Image (cartoon, rainbow, N blue to C red):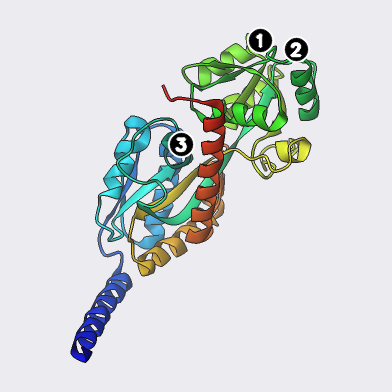
């Protein structure tokens, strides 16, 4: 019996020493970062800004591998099935890990268990805007108007199950109002129809409506994040303006496959936090209406779980099904 324990201890020690040695030399070859979306979108742009600087911090090239399709499932599954050696990483978004699992898409992995959280890269709130003809100046006034005229106000979205749609539904549920959802095929047509006055309300990414806000063609009331935006600090959050605790953001995180050794996670987290604290990345993300996050792997895991649970409740209560 004692011999068995000694053998087990020796094997454990050997694995530990091997892992430590690997972590000390890590990384010693190029890394692959899967972005589960086609090139050119917001996630891809943020990923490339981040990886350019992470390459410098790690001293190894990071190759961006765009694997779009099935709402991000194809790319995410590729990493879920990859070796947990630190050379195969996932640039995940909230749509892939927090929203899509509740919209009926069947993924071959468990979004909460099949990946190792490393660091939250950044987040971007939406902006609550209304057409200038809507007789409100504050979020409280919009809530009062919607309550007085159930179903009379229509809000546009980028499509069924998108963050702009779900943010509108979260707003309606939290405020106790009924608004008509009008889905479009993307941000551009949703913005055009709101500017034209065909719909009254739009929750949109700041870059897609900033020009219309500056020109007065849309009226901004608040932002959907937990903090005000540095780029437009005069706008309150919905939480401080009317609905305490309200938060809806697009966010991105760096993940590895399940079982990624803690020593490697530490190397990646340290390098990523160094990158995310730089002025260069802050300025780069600002163009996308985003801000760097950073923090610990545990903080990312907790944020992911909270976001996942929130959208499960919203989607389930409204019986929303993906297209």
Q: Are marks 2 and 1 in contact (CB under 8 Å)?
A: yes
Q: State the image coordinates of residue 170 (x, y, percent, origin top left).
A: 62, 31
How many numbered badges does the structure rendering display? 3
Work out whether residue 170 or residue 238 is closer to the camera in this orientation and state it: 170
Residue 157 versus residue 278 in the image, above or below: above
- First in sequence: mark 2 vs mark 3: 3
Give me the residue at 39% from left, 46% from top: 111
> Judging from the image, what secondary structure is the residue with disc 2 in?
loop
Q: Residue furthest front?
A: 1
Residue linked to disc 3: 95
Residue 166 versus residue 146 in the image, above or below: below
For the residue carrying disc 1, how many other residues have a C-alpha within 10 Å: few (<14), some (14-19), or many (20+)? Answer: some
- First in sequence: mark 2 vs mark 1: 2
Camera-near label (2 vs 3) is 3
- First in sequence: mark 3 vs mark 1: 3
Is residue 101 in view from this perspective? yes
Name the quadrant of the C terminus: top left
Q: State the image coordinates of residue 196 (x, y, percent, origin top left).
A: 63, 9
Name the quadrant of the N terminus: bottom left
Residue 146 versus residue 277 in the image, above or below: above
Residue linked to disc 1: 197
Residue linked to disc 2: 133
For the residue carrying disc 2, how many other residues have a C-alpha within 10 Å: few (<14), some (14-19), or many (20+)? Answer: few
């Amino acid at each position: 019996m004692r011999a068995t324990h000694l053998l087990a201890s020796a094997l454990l020690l050997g694995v530990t020493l091997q892992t430590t040695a690997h972590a000390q030399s890590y990384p010693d070859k190029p890394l692959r970062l899967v972005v589960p979306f086609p090139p050119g979108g917001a996630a891809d742009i943020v990923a490339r800004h981040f990886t350019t600087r992470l390459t410098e911090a790690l001293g190894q090239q990071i190759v961006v591998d765009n694997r779009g399709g099935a709402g991000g499932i194809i790319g995410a599954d590729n990493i879920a099935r990859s070796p947990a050696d630190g050379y195969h990483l996932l640039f995940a978004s909230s749509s892939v890990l927090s929203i899509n699992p509740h919209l009926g898409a069947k993924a071959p992995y468990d979004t909460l268990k099949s990946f190792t959280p490393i660091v939250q890269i950044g987040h971007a709130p939406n902006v609550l805007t209304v057409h200038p003809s809507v007789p409100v100046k504050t979020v409280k006034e919009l809530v009062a108007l919607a309550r007085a005229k159930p179903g009379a106000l229509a809000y546009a979205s980028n499509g069924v199950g998108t963050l702009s749609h779900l943010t509108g539904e979260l707003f309606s549920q939290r405020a106790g109002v009924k608004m008509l959802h009008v889905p479009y095929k993307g941000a551009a047509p949703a913005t055009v129809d709101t500017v034209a006055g065909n719909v009254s309300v739009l929750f949109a990414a700041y870059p897609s409506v900033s020009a219309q806000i500056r020109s007065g063609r849309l009226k901004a009331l608040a932002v959907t994040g937990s903090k005000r935006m540095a780029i437009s600090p005069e706008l309150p959050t919905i939480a401080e303006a009317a609905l305490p605790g309200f938060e809806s953001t697009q966010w991105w995180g760096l993940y590895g496959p399940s079982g990624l050794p803690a020593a490697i996670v530490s190397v990646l987290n340290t390098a990523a936090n160094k990158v995310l604290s730089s002025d260069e990345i802050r300025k780069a993300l600002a163009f996308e209406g985003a801000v760097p996050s950073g923090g610990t792997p545990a903080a990312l895991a907790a944020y992911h779980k909270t976001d996942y649970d929130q959208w499960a409740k919203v989607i389930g209560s409204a019986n929303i099904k993906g297209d």
